[in-house]
Image (cartoon, helix red, strand yellow):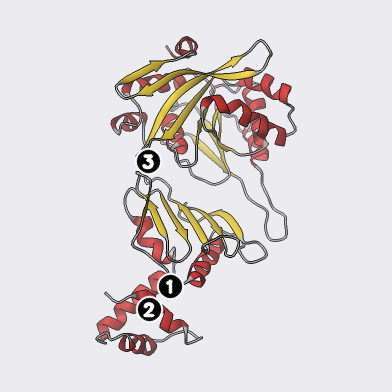
Amino acid sequence: MVDLGLVQSRLGELGRDYTPRDVAAALRDLGEVVTDSAVLATMDRLRRHSRGAGPLDDLLRQPGVSDVVVNGPADVFVDRGSGLERAGVTFVDDEQVRRLAIRLAAASGRRLDDSRPFVDGRLPDGTRLHAVLAPVSLPGTCLSLRVPAARSFSLDDLAAAGSIPAEGARLLRAMVTRRVPFLISGGTGSGKTTLLAALLAAVPPHERIVLVEDARELVPDHPHCVRLEGRVANAEGTGAITLAELVRQALRMRPDRVVLGEVRGGEITDLLRALNTGHEGGCATIHANSVTDVPARLEALAALGGLGREACHAQVAAALRLVVHVRRDVHGRRRVDEIGVVHREATDRVAILPGLRFVPGGIERLAGAAQVEELLC
């Protein structure tokens, strides 16, 4: 097959829009046999590479792909569920990566240029985009594309895939049906969103879920789910819609459950207030390395919302009951790791006690096991 990068390089030297005659000349210069079908096929490939995600389109369409990352023109990686692996795709130079990043940013309604060299957005098909232009990033312009799940997974699906034991799935289902308020913690790409979608699918169908996200990622298999999406400011600095504002709007929409897709800032204070005003069964995801690290993370985020340490701990103690932690194992596989319980200490500070840990072949009972089982069994 013709090396499309070399053809693009030859055409780029023209300094103008290319024609079929130019494509034929480029093929001839590269020693290719020039026929009408060869020119038409090359033109078609060039058009496909100038639309959508260009050279990355084929990777994004492959079954099982969750992430595609680009580290400059020579290094493209893909995650098919077992960690990042090198893909057989490269770019001609960093200028080609830069043009693709700017085009994708425009498609997501965002601005990307030297005055604002990074962007976070969502493409029309739901793909999550993050880009940083060189020279801010090395070894060149960087792209990170998070592919939305083609379908939602149920708790039974996760159990069948080995992400959680069957007994663990039963306990998590009980957590949802008993309207226990909870957080899902974990690192980036550990499977927090996938697990949350599976848990929301277990919400009784007659209940109304109001889901707040900064970028639409969750697609729960539930018949009554209203989704609210935040918005960043435009180029003039206006038009922003914050998650905190959306949480407050959600409370006026007669929700049975208020769900915050991912806590990243001061909106945690609004969620805690919501869960303390009769909205049972609410939940959110949060970045943390372990269940025991969650209180410190909540403190930091609550401070962004103007909530002091003592008030934060009091709100958390009243609003939340359990924390479910997910992680990737050494082979890159996502799995549910443990369930911790919110415990208010004698100092009135909150700690998360590890309760049940899911290990190969069963469940390990830890310090907070009895409290977890009291809530779920």
Sequence order check: which comes first, mark 2 or mark 1?
2
Q: Are marks 2 and 1 in contact (CB under 8 Å)?
A: yes
Q: Amino acid at mark 1?
A: Val
| Residue 143 image offset from top left, x and y in percent | 50, 58
Q: Residue at left 30%, top 34%? A: 161
| Number of marks present in the image shown | 3
Considering only vertical position in the picture, is 285 above or below 55?
above
- Quadrant into which the C terminus falls: top left
Q: Is residue 331 above or below residue 48?
A: above
| Residue 240 versus residue 276 in the image, above or below | below
Amino acid type of the residue that numbered disc 3 sits on in the rendered structure: Gly
- At a point 41% along the width and 59% down the height, the residue shown is 76
SS of the residue under disc 2: helix
**Residue 293 falls left or right of residue 269:** left
User: In the image, what residue type sits under mark 2?
Assistant: Leu
Q: CA distance from mark 2 to mark 3?
A: 35 Å
Residue at 51% in and 62% down: 139
The quadrant in which the N terminus is found is: bottom left
The numbered dot on residue 332 is: 3
Left or right of residue 35: residue 253 = right
Horizontal side, residue 147 vs residue 228: left or right: left
Mark 3 or mark 1: which comes first in sequence?
Answer: 1
Quarter-of-image position of residue 37: bottom left
Residue 92: mark in rendering: 1
Residue carrying label 2: 6
**Residue 100 spot, x, y in % from top left:** 49, 67
Q: Earlier in the sequence, mark 2 or mark 3?
A: 2
* In-front residue for pair 43/114: 114
